[in-house]
Image: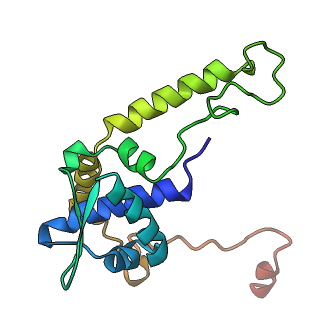
Amino acid sequence: MRLTTKGRFAVTAMIDLALRQEQGPVTLAGISQRQHISLSYLEQLFGKLRRHEIVESVRGPGGGYNLARRAEDVTVADIIIAVDEPLDATQCGGKGTCEGSKQRDGHCMTHELWSTLNQKMVEYLDSVSLKDLVDQQRAREAAPATVLRDRRTEAPAVEPARVVPKGPNSVFNMAGS
């Protein structure tokens, strides 16, 4: 089971929006440029997010999108479910029609395992708020950058010892004779 591009892009775009909405409505064109997500794809995602009342649109000059709720009230599960991302690891989509099942209930032998994974996954994604992700991103941006030194311009700390071969069959010994 893996999260598809739709869910990952939706969460990424929402983090971008939440990081910048204090300056006013955020344009999809701006998110598109910063996150390298196509504008038409963002329009589709934000249409769904708007219908689920996660974002609100502002029309006209200076328009764009704002969060419709506080960032702490929006969970990752809300975002993923809003863009129709399936959160299901079962083979049957939870319908009990597992392929190749010989059981009377229509479930495969591992149905309960995958069904429990679904439940745990939704619980986890529902426990992570958009604010948590925004705070995490701000902390990453505030962390001091690692300074890389160009060692090619520095003098070596210790001069390496020169090794001169002195074996009996060395061509270097012939120069001394």
Name the foreground residue: 86 vs 130. 86
Quick check: 149 left or right of 106? left
The answer to whether one can see residue 144 in this image is no
- Is 52 above or below relative to 93? below
> Residue 110's spot in the image, x, y percent?
70, 21
> Residue 75's spot in the image, x, y percent?
32, 43
Name the foreground residue: 59 vs 100. 59
Number of on-image labels = 0
For this orientation, the residue located farthest to the top is: 104
Quick check: 143 left or right of 121? left
Q: On the image, which quarter does residue 115 sit in? A: top right
Q: On the image, which quarter does residue 158 sit in? A: bottom left
Residue in the image at 28% along x and 43% along y: 129
The answer to whether one can see residue 77 in this image is yes
Residue in the image at 65% along x and 28% along y: 95
- Is 28 above or below relative to 111? below
> Residue 130's spot in the image, x, y percent?
28, 49
Quick check: 134 left or right of 123? left
Residue in the image at 40% along x and 76% along y: 32
